[in-house]
Image (cartoon, rainbow, N blue to C red):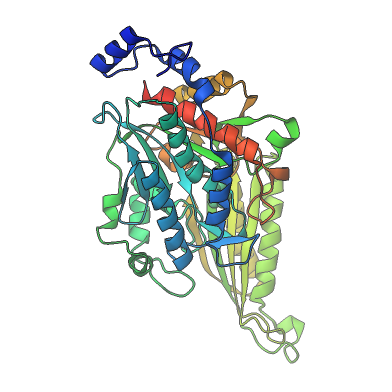
Amino acid sequence: VLGHAGEEDPTIRTMEEFSGYPFREPPSWVADSLPSLSVESENLQKQIDELASFSDTPAPSVTRVLYTDKDVMARRYVKNLMGLAGLSVREDAVGNIFGRWDGLEPELPAIATGSHMDAIPYSGKYDGVVGVLGAIEAINVLRRSGFKPKRSLEIIVFTSEEPTRFGIGCLGSRLMSGSKALLKALETTVDSQNITFLDAAKYAGYAQDSVESVFLKKGAYAGFVELHIEQGPILEEEGVSIGIVTAIAAPASITVDFEGSGGHAGAVLMPNRNDAGLAAAELALAVEKHVLESGSIDTVGTVGILQLHPGAINSIPSKSHLEIDTRDIDEERRNVVMEKIRQSAIRIAKDRGVKLAEFKIVNQDPPALSDESVIRAMESASKDLKLSHKLMISRAYHDSLFMARVSPMGMIFIPCYKGYSHKPEEYSSVQDITNGVKVLALTLAKLSLK
Ligand SMILES: NC(=O)N[C@@H](O)C(=O)O
Ligand SMILES: [Mn+2]
Ligand SMILES: [Mn+2]
């Protein structure tokens, strides 16, 4: 630790070596070390670009689905970077990856950070990745500045934040937070190729231990902070560098299956049809209607998957499958919308003479609130770094939503181009990423010394 004028202050050094503690109060450590918080921005950008190359679709899009070969390669790439950052690396039974930097008091609950690196089909290279590679660089920044954590610092790369393969988001963090419901569901869950979760996990080298072993022990972490792109336009529009997340909206997803009689597109006259496709179309519009009826801009609803069977132009759809995503920062208001959607599905099935074969609520999660002490640490870090910042909510969900169930939680947002996300045009500048990494590094340092 450097003295104000950069030379080592012998008395302080002896005191520190003797006590093993930074002798000065954190603020002065922070003040002293601020200038030396250097981010290797170009190298970080190169890593983001390299990680994006592990994709099942051509650049600039990124597609990296859970337990696929590209996912396994990307995991190997990140584990290697963790090793180079001097972290001890381990993985759990579903492939959540942990990189640990032991603190001066390793028995104390650690401070964790992290995010995900799976990517939905045809998406971008920053969602989740900035929170993983940025976290590793934040550790390198602290090491370079000579910082010694009191509480250990741990980076977590969560398995399957995206619901792409098994229809449920935040699979790894949900299990870590102790979701017995998910544990049960995973016994029978299959993907669109009918591959079970366990077989897919084994294919990727996981599921050696019981899935239940993923559950975190209570109090495992004293704090969790996730760095993420905003995925909305506010920070860019307002020219603000850092978003301090105070709450994460409540996500829910529903799958619906209709079954009708199908038949020949030419020979079956309109009055004699039970068209499962039209039932699905009508329900999709009903989702929009019920969301708009909530009267709040904070209520959203999306039908991101709509499949018809047999899917032939000259055959009346005999089956249809929809997947509905609805969210709100007000849980009650969202639940009212979900009930209206259920009522509409029943009515549409009756009106159109089709069978409502399935109406399944896959997840219906409460919103999460950030912890005051973590918010204060992120705010003072932004202030120390003289970066403009604002309090805001997250409309996207994140692993933080579930880490909040087992640890004081906070999230740091950085601006992204036009708020684009979940598409190849997703982009955050090197400067914005660098700012985010610095705020994360300083926040982790402050929380580690608590
Ligand atoms: N952050 C993010 O994109 N999470 C998604 O899984 C989502 O749908 O919100
Ligand atoms: Mn995402
Ligand atoms: Mn994400």
Quarter residue 349 falls in: bottom right
In the rendered image, the residue lying farthest to the bottom is 267
Question: Camera-side residue: 362 or 205?
Answer: 205
Query: In the rendered image, which quarter contains the N terminus?
Result: top left
Quadrant of the image containing the C terminus: top left
Q: Nearer the viewer, residue 101 or 96?
A: 101
Residue shown at 30% from the left, 29% from the top: 103
> Residue drawn 23% across and 15% down?
18
Is 397 placed left or right of 209 in the picture?
Answer: right
Q: Nearer the viewer, residue 276 or 142?
A: 142
Residue 335 visible in the displayed image = no
Above or below 178: residue 346: below
Relative height, residue 402 to residue 200 (above, below): above
- Eyeballing the image, is 292 above or below 162? above
Q: Find residue 294 and report its horizontal and vertical position in percent.
A: 67, 43
Residue 237, position as x, y percentages in the image? 75, 35
| Image-based side of 322 in relation to 135, left or right | right
Q: Is residue 66 left or right of residue 295?
A: left
* Closer to us: 450 or 41: 41
Q: Residue 417 lies in what quarter of the image?
A: top right
Q: What residue is rendered at 59% in x and 32% in y?
A: 435
Please state the total of marks drawn on the protein image. Answer: 0
Residue at image position (59%, 48%) is 126
The spot of residue 387 in percent (x, y) is 62, 24
